Image (tube, rainbow, N blue to C red):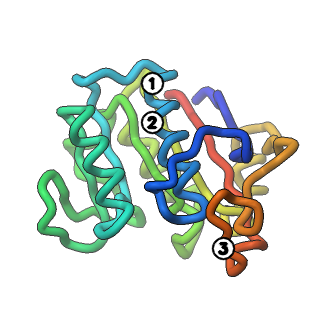
Amino acid sequence: MKILEFNSVDKTFRHDLEGVHWSRIYEYPLVLDLLDKYGANEDSDIHNTCWGWEGVHIWFKNILDKKYKNNINSDIKKSNEPNTCLYNLLHSPKEEWVEKFDFVLNISTLEEVSGDHIDVFKKSFSMVKPGGYFICTFDLPGLQLEKFEELFGRKYEVSNNPIAGNNSEVINKRYSHLKCGYMVIQK
């Protein structure tokens, strides 16, 4: 396991107001940029775990589906949207998913899961094929940060201008206490 990035999302990062939500306007473009940076191509096997199932989540799912022909989108709620399936992050992945994907994505969901976030990370990371990547965004507080710092053997890096609910291009004072981070882990 190689920790490539473990940082806060900065206000200077590219954003897209179609993302609507204070953090999603940064998270979705960041994930797309990271896919490009780490070599995703139209044939890459990508698992968007916890894609949502409505609104802005469908917008992002459709971008992934259009750009990557081997993209699947899973969540705990059944959807009638094409290219979706049921999967609960608390459970081990299907056997055929173990070490199958070039990229496994988790966008602002890991911190929402009750229980041990490291256990959920390990289950998600098990789906990454050797040489592949786990890309995750998360809110702080929320993610069990100290556990990840211990596992990774490195501290989380805070930028000079991290986004929060009160300084985003889409301000949401309800989330002014939250900051947003991301990690890229290579197997």
The CA span between labels 3 and 1 is 29 Å
Disc 2 residue crowd, few under 14, some 14–19, many 20+, Cα 10 Å: some
Quarter of the image holding residue 80?
Answer: bottom left
Residue at the disc numbered 3: 172
**Mark 1: amino acid:** Asp
Q: For this view, does 56 lie left or right of residue 62?
A: right
Residue at the disc numbered 2: 32
Decide: is 122 above or below 14: below
Q: Secondary structure at mark 3?
A: loop
Label at residue 174: none
Q: Give how far across and how far down residue 144 sits, in percent.
A: 70, 62
Decide: is 35 above or below 143: above
Quarter of the image holding residue 138?
Answer: bottom right
**Contact check, label 1 and label 2, Cβ < 8 Å:** yes
Q: Nearer the viewer, residue 138 or 97?
A: 138
**Mark 3: amino acid:** Asn
Residue at the disc numbered 1: 36
Q: For this view, does 139 lie left or right of residue 156?
A: left
**Mark 2: amino acid:** Leu
